[in-house]
Image (cartoon, rainbow, N blue to C red):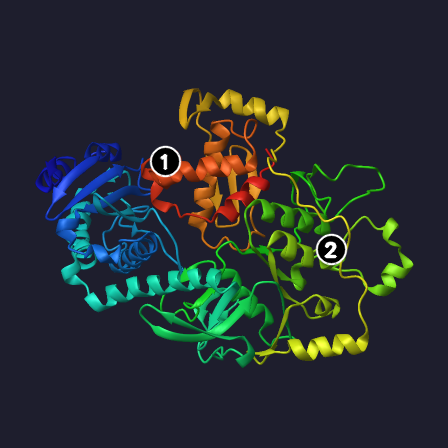
Amino acid sequence: MKQAEDLRRLLESIDHKSYPAYKSAQGAYAFGGYILSIDHVQGDPFASPSKVSVTVPHQKAGYPASLFDTPWKRTAFEDYLVRQFAGEIARFNFKAKGSGKSGLIATSSPGPEILSRTACQCDENGITARFEVGFPAFGRTIHSGELIKILFDFLPKCVQSVFFYRSRNPREVQAVADLAEDQHFIRQELKRLDLAAFVADGSVLPRESGVSSRPMKGGVAFYSPEQLKVTLNLPHKGALNGMGIRRGITLIVGGGYHGKSTLLKALELGVYDHIAGDGREYVITDETALKLRAEDGRSINNVDISMFINDLPNGRDTRCFSTPDASGSTSQAAGVIEGIESGARTFLIDEDTSATNFMLRDELMQQIISRDKEPITPFIERARDLYEKAGISTIMVAGSSGAYFYIADTVIQMDCYRPFDITRTVKEACARYGQDPTTSAPGFSLPSGGRKLSIDASSASGQSRMHRGSFRGGREESRREERIKTKVYGKDFLQVGKEQVDLRFVEQLIHSEQTAALAQMMRWCVEKQLFSRFSVSQIVELLTKEIRKGGLTAISDTSYGAMGLCMPRVQEIFACLNRYRG
């Protein structure tokens, strides 16, 4: 392997040459205690920055193996290192001068959620950190003295500070592993205690603002009502009290601005672990929980929505329904069926973002428009069967109709951000008011599996022109004519070839790096022509198997492009596939 001094001499020799001469620096170099790899060099100082990585062998790093000996502790450990490294290199960002992106040093920028990222990976080879560097130039002339400053002065300080255990506070690092174990323990307890979610006493759920993920200063702390209180004995924190939301049908009610949607949002993001100090680190939700909402204009492809929509006036079959432009009720019906297919065990619903005619029909409307004239079976008439026959719980925010009181197992009232269990009061009120006759509907049956996406003929021929290949036994046999390009627009949109996928309403997608990973997954599926030969569930299984075997790099179009990827949940992979119009 080349040594650090070889790199220094090379950089000195190409000083003041034209920018493409930087490409001769690609390769791996042994520095003191770590290996620096220049994986990809940008084409000019105004292009996307160069891709660089650092690998520190475990014997040099010195971190105890107990900090990353389980998958959940490893993810938390990697997340901790990314955060620390991002903070360190930010001190040197653009301290080296030049034109364009010269002097940029950057890596992933995590939010409060703990996610599996390619920016830092801990495996049998050691700890690998991936980041970007803008190789300095004046105009398009190499200024290697500034790059030497970055690679031989700035970077060693950052690597020593973060990736060598002797430079860290042992208690701080151990606290990360302990929190990860406690969070995993709570997730296991949810299953044992038949809970859909747990919200610890003392949690701070309100955020600083609608566009900030930081906890609100002076926000009201959450404390469980006595009737719903659960005590968990965590491995490290010990006894922890909080509200346990039992499986079944749970309503969250209350006046406007009293915290209903704030609680639901915390539960929605409780599918992810959170860092200490976020205020929601002990808000833990069933990891398969899925937020459902209306999504006017989305495409629906071969979905059996007959559980909710049937007997259309034009006689159209809803057992295999497709449309490029769904209404709110149709999109929400499809969302339920697709959620069942993705393995969701809990649905999260806010009536503010739901289609009213999908959620319920009041008694007067039923008297005027008889059932045989209405093709929509509202969710209220299916929610009980979804739980009792399919094991899928519902947690719903309601504020304008009391119809759901009749089917609710638990009713939580939010009052000034404080929860109160009013289930008994509600049931007594329902008994006085009289039984609502519209809480169930006949003909409940789950859709059969094996759903395939219908592929547009012109799109399929376009795939064939771009990539003549096949997928056999997990291996690719191909002759590429042209790679399919991908683009990502924040976290809400991705593009594969000419097809754009709208993910704005996939609300549990929280980071643009998850969207970038989904774009690579979609490209991988299109290039291997999986849509025409496998069901949606089989495609997801093939994807996750490939990623388990080789990481997110295995489905990336370039090895160096794997820096900015972050693993989404299975539910978001299904959501992306279902919104692909190709």
- Spatial distance from mark 2 to mark 1, Cα to Cα? 41 Å
Q: Is residue 57 shown to the viewer in this render?
A: yes
Query: Residue flagged by tag 2: what amino acid is it?
Result: Phe
Neighbours of disc 2 within 10 Å: few (<14), some (14-19), many (20+): many
Query: Is 363 left, or right, of 577 in this rendering?
Result: right
Quadrant of image for the C terminus:
top right
Name the secondary structure under disc 1: helix
Image vertical order of residue 159 relative to residue 245, above or below = above
Q: Which residue is label 1 attached to?
A: 554
Answer with mark 2 or mark 1, whichever residue precedes in sequence.
2
Image vertical order of residue 283 relative to residue 290, above or below = below
What's the mark number on residue 358? 2
Query: Is 10 left, or right, of 288 in this rendering?
Result: left
Query: Is 549 left, or right, of 3 in this rendering?
Result: right
Query: Residue flagged by tag 1: what amino acid is it?
Result: Ala
Name the secondary structure under disc 2: helix
Q: Residue 405: which quarter of the image? A: bottom right
Q: Is residue 270 shown to the viewer in this render?
A: no
